[in-house]
């Protein structure tokens, strides 16, 4: 396989505020030799997830991307060479491939996929750890959604948010309200995903509109945004509400000065709770969660729209699309291969 060329996206500089494409560089590299216990994968599709942004500043919760190093990303791909009997050429696999066209990894880092139950990209979206499993975990295990709940989702038109609202509805919530930016996203949430209602934070007063839509208060809030949106919802929580912190995209461009909620005293006033989570703390629930998500997906009860950018060179631009909310559903990059 020495003739293969690996096209990579590497971090050229730590972003200062908003991401710039000049923070990245596209380079060609050689593909390494496949040694015992390793597998060479042609990367077919990469997942564009919010956690990637938190790795680019040189610190933070997730492992940091190194200057000159390939940018982290999850993906699905095809085995092209294997030195492990558990993986054969042609197998479809998923793993932490990073932003490159070929990934040479120890086999223990890979999972073989059964594409008869769902397309490969579903294992990055509706069935993926950073999307489907995160949504399910936050709503079911952390938020403890139950029949009759009024549930609010911020960042509701993104990958995690669009699934979280559907999981809440399928778990018995009587009212599911999404918060998103733009009329087209509001329409998407209500008309395609079955949300009860949606609020356009760019053109509506979130706090006031939420008071109208949920006069008895919000029982469960699944937050992907933080900042002023979190504060607006806190003003509308019901007694014994549960606030689940999944992400805070409004804060990711200034991780050195993250701002917490100013209205947090509503938690005490309303005997409510706020809990953060990371999906990898719930590994014992993965199998059950994936089984349920697969059933909903197969039956058509769960919808995952995909927004696909074409070519590894579009990876930096796709990160900007994610940060600026310029997509619906799951954002992916289909990787063009160079041989």
Image (cartoon, helix red, strand yellow):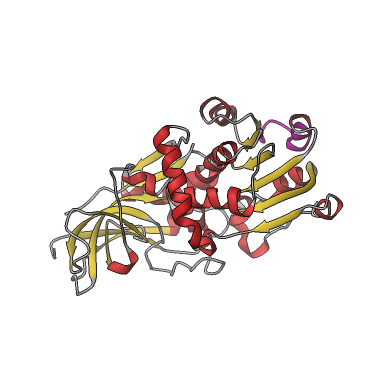
Magenta highlight on residue 186? no
Residue occupying image coordinates x 56% and y 43%: 164
Q: Is residue 197 left or right of residue 118?
A: right
Q: Nearer the viewer, residue 97 or 101?
A: 97
Figure check: 146 above or below 142: above
User: Is 60 above or below relative to 163?
Assistant: below
Query: Quadrant where the N terminus lies?
Result: bottom left
The picture places residue 212, in percent across and down from the top left corner, at 78, 29
From the top left corner, tell me how far across and down residue 271 is, in percent.
82, 53
Q: Could you tell me which residue is drawn at 80 percent across and 35 percent down?
A: 216
Q: Give residue 206's position: percent from left, percent from top.
A: 73, 36
In this rendering, is residue 183 above or below 259?
A: above
- Would residue 79 be found to the left or right of residue 295 on screen? left
Q: Residue at x 17, y 62 (%)?
A: 81
Q: Position of residue 21 (x, y in %)?
A: 44, 52
Q: Residue 183 lies in what quarter of the image?
A: top right
Which range is magenta? 200-210
Tell whether 289 sits left or right of 69. Answer: right
């Amino acid at each position: 396989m020495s003739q293969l060329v690996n096209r990579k996206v590497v971090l050229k500089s730590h972003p200062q505020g908003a991401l710039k494409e000049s923070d990245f560089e596209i380079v060609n590299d050689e593909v390494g030799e496949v040694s015992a216990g390793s597998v060479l994968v042609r990367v077919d599709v990469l997942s564009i997830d919010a956690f990637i942004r938190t790795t680019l500043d040189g610190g933070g919760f997730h492992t940091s991307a190194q200057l000159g190093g390939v940018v982290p990303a999850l993906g699905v791909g095809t085995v092209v060479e294997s030195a492990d009997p558990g993986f054969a050429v042609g197998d479809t696999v998923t793993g932490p491939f990073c932003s490159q066209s070929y990934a040479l990894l120890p086999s223990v880092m890979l999972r073989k996929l059964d594409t008869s139950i769902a397309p490969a990209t579903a294992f990055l979206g509706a069935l993926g750890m950073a999307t489907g499993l995160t949504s399910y975990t936050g709503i079911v295990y952390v938020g403890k959604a139950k029949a009759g709940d009024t549930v609010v989702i911020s960042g509701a038109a993104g990958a995690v948010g669009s699934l979280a609202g559907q999981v809440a509805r399928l778990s018995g919530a009587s009212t599911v309200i999404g918060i998103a930016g733009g009329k087209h996203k509001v329409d998407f949430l209500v008309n395609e995903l079955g949300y009860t209602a949606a609020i356009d934070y760019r053109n509506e007063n979130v706090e006031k509109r939420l008071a109208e839509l949920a006069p008895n208060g919000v029982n469960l809030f699944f937050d992907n945004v933080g900042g002023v949106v979190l504060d607006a919802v806190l003003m509308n929580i019901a007694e014994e509400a549960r606030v689940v912190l999944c992400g805070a995209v409004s804060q990711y461009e200034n991780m050195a000065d993250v701002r917490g909620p100013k209205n947090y005293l509503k938690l005490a006033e309303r005997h409510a709770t706020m809990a953060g989570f990371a999906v990898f703390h719930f590994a014992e629930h993965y199998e059950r969660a994936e089984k349920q998500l697969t059933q909903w997906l197969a039956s058509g009860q769960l919808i995952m729209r995909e927004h696909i950018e074409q070519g590894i060179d579009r990876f930096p631009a796709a990160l900007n699309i994610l940060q600026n909310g310029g997509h619906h559903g799951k954002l992916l990059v289909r990787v063009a291969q160079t041989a």
